[in-house]
Amino acid sequence: MSKLFSYDISARDGKARRGVISTPKGQIQTPAFMPVGTAATVKAMMPENVRATGADILLGNTYHLMLRPTAERIDQLGGLHKFMNWDRPILTDSGGFQVMSLNALRKMSEDGVTFKSHIDGSKHMLTPERSMEIQKLLGSDIVMCFDECTPFPATEEESLRSMQMSMRWAARSRDAFGDRPGYALFGIQQGSVFKDQREESADKLRAVGFEGYAVGGLAVGEGQGLMFDVLDYAPGMLPEDKPRYLMGVGKPDDIVGAVQRGIDMFDCVLPSRSGRTGQVFTRLGVLNIKNARHADDPRPLDENCSCPACSNYSRAYLHHVFRAQEIISSMLLTWHNLQYYQDLMSGLRGAIEQNALDAFAAEFHATRAQGDIEPL
């Protein structure tokens, strides 16, 4: 296995790319979906079971881990990989999004962000330098720059101020990250829905230089149409030979559309969160396992799925354990949803290799349109 971080593109189909990210901890097949392990666990899943679905990489959360159990404690215990029993690559976000979304009383300055813990009210400060320190203590393979996730809607002036500060923080993140062979630092493009700001952000990030680049500030309430409008041009502003990561996305049709527009990496809590609330993703669309129509249904969730929920249990059983609030419901439904997402990514990779992505996407949408989609 390579001791350095690298990205190799093996096939293209329109703007879409099929590639491999190589790290000392293993390879990541792209386009890739990263299950979210917020607090050093993918909820309701064992690490080996997450791997069994086809996941090459997990995402951990700087904000939550710095508060509990603390990055220093994880470092003393051998780092995040050992701590959570995951020996493959881990990406950690910078903490910026959680500071925005979980802390209404945060105070932001050029230096960083001061906030109170949502757990115990203790006061903390995150700066680009501290975010880099935390992620180094965790042992993350892919580290994200510290940035402000610009809220939506934002005026052009508000977005510009936010983006330009994030670009100054990106340069500070790069300096604080230092020279760490085998590890990668990703810059994050901002600029909301304003094309000229996206261009300015990309130019500033390219000038600093990163091992990969993220498209940030989307999936924050702007809707799929506007998100796709931005993705029609934003990924092409970033270096062609580096991975492109769309943060916090998303729904299956979001992912298909974003891959068609040149995105390589995704993360979202949706498959695991939905597993705990009874929302199930299938080739035919979304079903709600708590609905009474499933109470006597002997069929699997999806006859073409190989996960344990589909191989060994009926919809009737899954309906029963969900309504009875049994823990096995979260386990089985989360496993199924994660398997669905990884199967979707595998299908997208194969379609790009065969130069058949548009046909794959058309079939994906047509199958879901004909399916039995239930209101939630």
Image (spheres, helix red, strand yellow):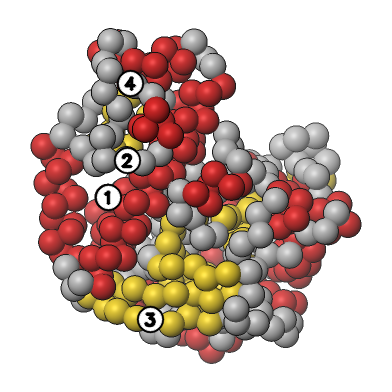
Element under label 1?
A: helix
Q: Please determine whether, in this image, residue 323 is positioned above or below residue 358.
A: above
Q: Is residue 295 left or right of residue 208?
A: left
Q: Please determine whether, in this image, residue 93 is positioned above or below residue 197.
A: above
Q: Is residue 365 left or right of residue 61?
A: left
Q: Are marks 1 and 4 in contact (CB under 8 Å)?
A: no
Name which residue type carries label 4: Arg
Q: Disc number at residue 9?
A: 3
- Mark 2 and mark 1: Cα distance apart in space: 19 Å
Mark nearer the N terminus (2 vs 1): 1
Q: Quadrant of the N terminus?
A: bottom right
Q: Quadrant of the C terminus?
A: top left
Name which residue type carries label 2: Cys
Residue 27 or 123: which is nearer the viewer?
A: 27
Q: Please determine whether, in this image, residue 360 is positioned above or below residue 49.
A: below
Residue that mark 1 sits on: 253
Element under label 3?
A: strand
Mark nearer the N terminus (3 vs 1): 3
- Mark 3 and mark 4: Cα distance apart in space: 41 Å
Residue that mark 2 sits on: 305
Q: Residues within 10 Å of mark 3 (few under 14, many from 20)?
A: some
Q: Are marks 2 and 1 in contact (CB under 8 Å)?
A: no
x, y (%) of residue 316? Answer: 34, 15
Asked if residue 137 can be seen in this view, the reply is: yes
Residue placed at 81% from the left, 53% from the top? 74
